[in-house]
Amino acid sequence: MAAERSRGSNSSEIRNPVLAELGELHKGRKKIQPTGRTIRKFYQEAAPKLQHPLLTLDAEQRDEVAAAFAQVIQEKKYTCYACAVMPDHVHILIRKHKFTDEQIAEHLMTASRYRLIERGFREKTHPTWIAGFGWTVFQFDPDDMRRTIRYIEDNPRKGRLPEQKWPFVAPYDGWPLHSGHSPNSPYARALRDAGRYPQ
């Protein structure tokens, strides 16, 4: 299960020396997240150094991103358990699929970028999403899945946005311990080894 944030990067180096002035590169998610004030200050300092303008998603654009996600999820037959489209990032929880998390992210990011361009919200040269595939986490513990779903669903409220209910989001079915699952699946065995498999 990949929890995708379509901002953030897995870059291992800073290729533009102008950006190096902004600070050291930190790969992955920091254990202690910076304050909102620190992030806003970073954006203010970074904006004039960037090749493309920093653009956020307003309500109409967030709907367009969600519509692109809906199309991809239907075409690729993904199962999505939660999604929050925020002004400057996305959280989405997709059930494990034959595609890798990088491929899933690419499908979602590419489709949403093209849709925003087609609707006139972005120039063709604007990347929309930052390079890379965001921050991904694989989860197979139902408790962790439910916690992540709550976290994603709560994001709009924390961002002072209306509640988001997307039609492509399916009710959580307990995966990988959903009805009819194999007790000998790799996930069930891992949960059993960890003492988390229901008796």
Image: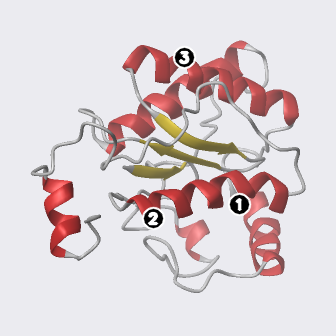
Q: Name the residue rendered at 52%, 84% in the picture.
A: 31
Is 180 positioned to the left or the right of 13 in the image? Answer: left
Query: Please, what is the three-letter code of the amino acid marked with disc 1?
Result: Lys
What residue is pinned by disc 1? 49
Q: Residues within 10 Å of mark 3 (few under 14, many from 20)?
A: some
Q: Name the residue rendered at 66%, 24% in the picture.
A: 167
The answer to which quarter of the image holds residue 71 is top right
Assign the C terminus to one quadrant of the image. Answer: bottom left
Q: Give how far across and how far down residue 1 sits, in percent.
A: 36, 49
Residue 113 marker: none
Kindly report which numbered mark, 1 or 3, lies closer to the viewer in this rendering: 3
Kindly report which numbered mark, 1 or 2, lies closer to the viewer in this rendering: 2
**Colouring convention used in this rendered image of the protein:** secondary structure
Q: Badges 1 and 2: C-beta atoms under 8 Å apart? A: no
Q: Residues within 10 Å of mark 1 (few under 14, many from 20)?
A: some
Real-space CA distance between mark 1 and mark 2, rounded to the nearest whole angstrom: 39 Å
Query: Please, what is the three-letter code of the amino acid marked with disc 3?
Result: Gln
Front residue of this view, candidates 31 and 16: 31
Image vertical order of residue 54 relative to residue 199, above or below: above
Q: Is tag 3's residue or tag 2's residue first in the polypeptide sequence? A: 3
Real-space CA distance between mark 3 and mark 2, rounded to the nearest whole angstrom: 27 Å
Query: Helix, strand or loop at disc 1?
Result: helix
Kindly report which numbered mark, 3 or 2, lies closer to the viewer in this rendering: 2
What residue is pinned by disc 2? 144
Q: Name the residue rendered at 45%, 65% in the picture.
A: 144
Query: Please, what is the three-letter code of the amino acid marked with disc 2?
Result: Asp
Q: Is tag 1's residue or tag 3's residue first in the polypeptide sequence? A: 1
Q: Is tag 1's residue or tag 2's residue first in the polypeptide sequence? A: 1
Image vertical order of residue 192 relative to residue 145, above or below: below
Q: Give how far across and how far down residue 172 sits, in percent.
A: 50, 43
Residue 71 marker: 3
Real-space CA distance between mark 1 and mark 3, rounded to the nearest whole angstrom: 35 Å
